[in-house]
Image (cartoon, grey):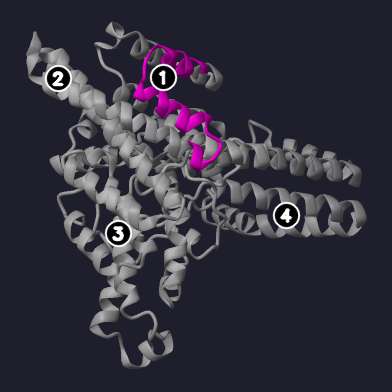
Amino acid sequence: MAEAAGGGAGFLEQLKSCVVWSWTYLWSLWFFLMLFLVYVLRVPLKINDNLSTVSMFLNTLTPKFYVALTGTSSLISGLILIFEWWYFRKYGTSFIEQVSVSHLRPLLGGVDNNSPSNSNTSNGDSDANRQSVSECKVWRNPLNLFRGAEYNRYTWVTGREPLTYYDMNLSAQDHQTFFTCDTDHLRPADAIMQKAWRERNPQARISAAHEALELNECATAYILLAEEEATTIVEAEKLFKQALKAGEGCYRRSQQLQHHGAQYEAQHRRDTNVLVYIKRRLAMCTRKLGRTREAVKMMRDLMKEFPLLSMFNIHENLLEALLELQAYADVQAVLAKYDDISLPKSATICYTAALLKARAVSDKFSPEAASRRGLSTAEMNAVEAIHRAVEFNPHVPKYLLEMKSLILPPEHILKRGDSEAIAYAFFHLQHWKRVEGALNLLHSFRMIPYPLEKGHLFYPYPICTETADRELLPSFHEVSVYPKKELPFFILFTAGLCSFTAMLALLTHQFPELMGVFAKAFLSTLFAPLNFVMEKVESILPSSLWHQLTRI
């Protein structure tokens, strides 16, 4: 029975493939056969009489009818154009094209994306897909601003919200991961803060932090107040210093008990995260207040004390502070440690390496001189480094060259996306301006985002960045898209059709008689080849054959 069923299924598949093949290659023959049948049956069907009636009816129509016809066609095509444009702006594809591919193509014998043959992809494609998913992972911005002292001040001045709900929700999840543990319910202050990190209302979170401080010196409560209630960096620094005092005490106590059980180990891990976070934010406050050397020392000490906590990406804070001090040798030393093939890349790593290479040649670089004598080894290294950086994140040059306005960076970024480009350029634009000629060297890549001529230094650019960036960035910002999407064919077609029919309606309204003569001449010219072919066929075939076919 199984073999019989398999044989029947195989026969049906062969039959289906034959039908698909016939539709694919024999449609032209079928078309001519249909035309031949229509011509043979023109007498029984009274086609000539009907055509004469139609021509008489068309001759009786006034120019107003043609004006209404062309005007209606222009209106309909204009509405289709508006809908297609809106759909393309919102979803990035043509509605007509999507319907054609999704519904009409399978009916006409196209490849089904859900077929088993397509589901069995190669190992290389699977690896590429997994890499694409991993590269679309959202990361915590290591240089994120303070909500109370910076983001809220922007809202007070402009009335705009710089952070999206999606971005703030990710931050809430981070806070619950870093600052809470399973034993918080045993301590009243920590239990209150555990609920506070889940609270959506900022004022409710701040009130809960004050309530927790009334019970105990709670480090996480000071963190929340420093992040959201402090209106200046000075106030935030004072609160973080109080948090540091409370956090160090909790860290020392949990360090002594971490080996007594899984709960104590989880509590020690939480206290470690809290202490590292406080010290890093204190260093960032010191950097923002102009004490850059002190900030560099704090960051170096923190990286030595906790070398395994790479999830905070403290080295990116250190690179920015060292660039401010123009300590380029120290920057190169940090890059030598973190610009490794086994470590995840970032725009800060790639573009800082490119800046150092450009600094060596940018002051003497001239495009005209380079075109005459060719690029030197140092200039070639600089160009390759810039190319590597642009290939990793093609959105950055627009912001560094000030071809696009900057906004406040989000609290989370998507690597290789527009959000990462904003976060990098917001802090590093001044460092590129400080190096004479560096932006001129970068100017050769000003056409980004367009596809690069060469590359493949990294995995293929992920296709999910645009969707994720639209969730991370505020609505008033125009998201940069790579590669730049060309307008679909159907938008161009409907635009041309709308313009053409509108022009015909206007000309028919202004010059009705002239347009009537033009339309008759156009139709006669259009059908002249067909009439010529039909006359030749009638002259070649005998009249008796036509008579017999007609009788049949």
Residue situated in front as seen by the camera: 136 or 487: 136
Picture quarter containing residue 176? top left
- Look at label 3 and name its amino acid: Cys
Q: Is residue 171 magenta?
A: no
- Mark 1 or 2: the one toward you: 2
Residue 444, percent from left and from top: 43, 73
Crowd tier of the residue under label 1, counting other residues whose Cα lies within 10 Å: few below 14, some 14–19, many 20 or above: many
Q: Residue at x 31, y 78 (%)?
A: 360
In the depicted structure, whether residue 83 falls above or below residue 524 = above
Question: Marks 2 and 4, Cα distance to the nearest angstrom?
Answer: 87 Å
Q: Is residue 40 visible?
A: no
Q: Are marks 2 and 4 in contact (CB under 8 Å)?
A: no
Q: Earlier in the sequence, mark 1 or mark 3?
A: 1
Q: Is residue 438 left or right of residue 549?
A: left
For residue 251, say whether it is visible.
yes
**If you read the primary sequence from the N terminus, does the residue marked by circle 2 or circle 3 appear first?**
2
Q: Can you tell which of label 2 and label 3 is closer to the viewer? A: 2
Q: Residues within 10 Å of mark 4 (few under 14, many from 20)?
A: few
User: Mark 1 vs mark 4: which is more N-terminal?
Assistant: 1
Mark sitting on residue 350: 3
- Closer to us: mark 2 or mark 4? 2
Q: Which mark is residue 265?
A: 2
Q: Is residue 70 left or right of residue 380?
A: right
Is the N terminus in the top left, top right, bottom left or bottom right quadrant?
top left
Closer to the chain start, of discs 1 and 2, is 1
Q: Secondary structure at mark 2?
A: helix
At horizontal 35% and vertical 27% (from top left) the residue drawn is 174
- Answer left or right for 476 relative to 503: left
